[in-house]
Amino acid sequence: MKKDVQEVDFLIIYEHKVRELENMCLIKYELEKRGYKVLIKHIEDEEALEAVKPIYHARVVMTMACYQNASLEWHTKDFVSFDKVIDMQWENIVYPKDEREGVFKNYTGIGREVVRVSWGEANRRRLLSAAHMDPKNIKVVGHIGMDFLRDELKGYYMGRDELFEEYGLPTDKKVLLFASPFYADNLSEDYIAGMCKKHGDDWRDYYDFMMRSERIILEWMEKLCGERNDILVIYRPHPGHIGVHMSEVEKRCENFKVISEKSVKQWIIASDIVYTGNSSTIVEAYFAGRMCHLLFPLEVTDGFELKLISQGKKITDYEGFARTVDEENPVFPIDRSAINEIYLVDEKEPSYKKLADMAEEVYKDPSYNLTKEQLASYRTKQPPLIQVQKKLQQWDWFYDKYKEILANEHIHWHWVEGQRALRREKAKRNERFAIESTSEEEIDEIVKKIARQLDPKS
């Protein structure tokens, strides 16, 4: 049955729920307040995966990243047509090795043509000098996620007692939060090879650094939990990371908990002390008014240490880590000047309003439209196996027969095995969607919660 194309003003595509969804809902709140129609979809949404032609037309698509043609094709698939693109660039802070010209994160193809959000001047300079972007397409608006730590939204997050009751956590202990920057545990060789292809062979060395660092820090935490019954360690994995070693520690220690749900800011404000490593989480802790320590049991692989923390005070051994629990009047490990270099912080106007102003400008100004040639250029010709599958999906009777053949264990034709492999890959993507997905009802609840803070009379 033919489905009419639904018109929306802004379609926002997100990848990691805990990293992006609240921020997207804040943008949705402000743009809808201004009269626009806004839709939020996950990058692996079932509608997106099943679509063989656009079911939405968006005047503006807002993506989580647009490095090159393949990025945009992955995000938009076949389910949406659009006129303009704003790259939210959630990976705004790059490794020093990625600041030079010609590397993956400095954009090629359609990635050079879209409008791009910059959190501050440092990233804008990089986009001009290394990526050679048009200055008009670089928009310095600050980091919208930091708006949740402003006075206007200070009541958005749950209080500690309410949060801990939800998770069955004790409320009578000193709470240590580790916001993990590690995402290398149990990565496949194919993934590692792909990262090396994108970012250089030294990424394999950084993978090894992350693996060994995580093991050491987990050893520190397990030892501390055994020595101190008056503490609770909350291990917050990197978004999308499901690791084995942290789970093993959790089984052995009653006062060590691994929790992936909710944004890191929710856990920061509910904790007494925050710990992280090679991560920008330290900035969120700073604006939340929480002490944050940098744990570096090993030296970072050359070229991978973030400039934000390169001059910061680091803890390199267990004794230094253990002392932080009872330390009086600790000194924050990085200077405010380092934060100001990377983040635009406007005490008078929050970033979400700056971003909404920018989005309106892009929406209204036809000079931001991508050309027909640009809109055609980013798509690759799909392999025959995928073309067959998508063609069959357009006719219900043929598609039902196609699924019957795939389910028949006695049929092993070459093309059938290829189609089965595609279905298995799709099933893996659906597993990921099950973790990261949200519903329209959940989005509406987050928007209403935001509205109650920003406009109590509404």
Image (cartoon, rainbow, N blue to C red):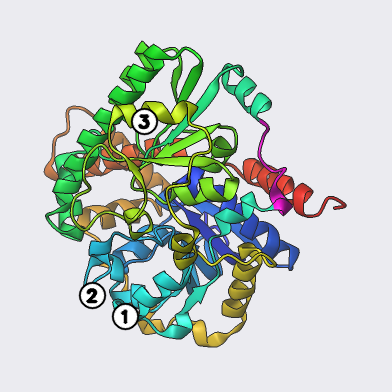
Relative placement, left or right, of 105 versus 363 is: left
Q: What residue type is labelled 2?
A: Glu
C-alpha span from label 2 to label 1: 8 Å
The local secondary structure at tag 2 comes to: loop
Farthest front residue in view: 328
Q: Quadrant of residue 244?
A: top left
Q: Which residue is drawn at 52% across and 33% down?
A: 328
Q: Position of residue 283 (x, y in %)?
A: 49, 52
Residue named by callout 3: 321
Q: What residue type is labelled 1?
A: Ser
Residue named by callout 2: 101
Q: Position of residue 450 (x, y in %)?
A: 71, 49
Residue named by callout 1: 129
Label 3, residues with CA under 10 Å away: few <14, some 14-19, many ≥20: many
Q: What stretch is highlighted in magenta?
A: 151-159
Main SS of residues in magenta:
loop
The local secondary structure at tag 3 comes to: helix
Depicted 132 relative to depicted 161: above or below: below
Q: Quadrant of residue 174?
A: top right
Determine whether label 2 and label 1 are within 8 Å by CB: yes
Q: Which residue is drawn at 64% across and 20% down?
A: 165
Q: Say whether disc 3 or disc 1 marks the residue closer to the N-terminus.
A: 1
Q: Say whether disc 2 or disc 3 marks the residue closer to the N-terminus.
A: 2
Residue 5 visible to the viewer: no
